[in-house]
Amino acid sequence: MESYKALDYNFGKGLNISTEIRDFLHEAARWAYVLSILGFIMVGFFIVVAIFAGTFISIVMSESQNDISGFPSAILTVIYLVIAGINVFPVLYLYRFAQNTKHALRSDNQTALVYAFENLRSHYRFIGIFAIIIIGFYTLIFIFSIFASVAL
């Protein structure tokens, strides 16, 4: 196994972006752009569903044999709007990463590349914190379900 010092990376002399690294960054930026556009479409879909959730529930309840007319459709609207609001931030960070990376590679702009990676860091930070919150939420549900099953 070669040591890192034997591989002349020009440590301390600045960052050298080779053609291969440039190609990898360009491809990553393209995929990040595609995923961010799909994410914006998903956010838009959640907003549309939130707007029409009340109408949809009214139609389903009028045709249903069950009497669930007490279900407030506004709760469903709020839930979908919260989901859309949560998703807009990581998607926006990913979009900014893609745009700034493409700009940096086209114009050899170091500042744009720094801003791109700042947005990528923000994207992953948001996703990581959100994942920790969800795992904590599932853990609480698991603990409460154990206590509920013991109490029965």
Image (cartoon, rainbow, N blue to C red):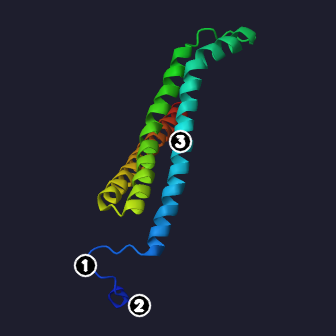
The picture quadrant where one finds residue 68 is top right
**In the displayed structure, does residue 74 sit left or right of residue 55?**
left
Mark 3 residue element: helix
Mark 2 or mark 1: which comes first in sequence? 2
Mark 1 residue element: loop
Amino acid type shown at disc 2: Glu
Amino acid type shown at disc 1: Lys
Residues packed near mark 2 inside 10 Å, few (<14), some (14 to 19) or many (20 plus): few
Mark 2 residue element: loop
Camera-near label (3 vs 2) is 3
Task: Give whichever of 141, 57 is nearer the camera.
Answer: 57
Q: Residue at x 48, y 57 (%)?
A: 29
Are discs 3 and 2 less than 8 Å apart at CB? no
Q: Which mark is residue 2?
A: 2
**In the displayed structure, does residue 136 sit left or right of residue 77?**
left
CA separation in Å, label 3 and label 2: 42 Å
Split into 4 quadrants, where in the image is the N terminus? bottom left
Q: Which residue is mark 3?
A: 39
Amino acid type shown at disc 3: Gly
Mark 1 or mark 3: which comes first in sequence? 1
> Horizontal and vertical percent for residue 53?
60, 19
Are discs 2 and 1 less than 8 Å apart at CB? no
> Against 78, is 95 above or below?
below
Q: Which residue is mark 1?
A: 13
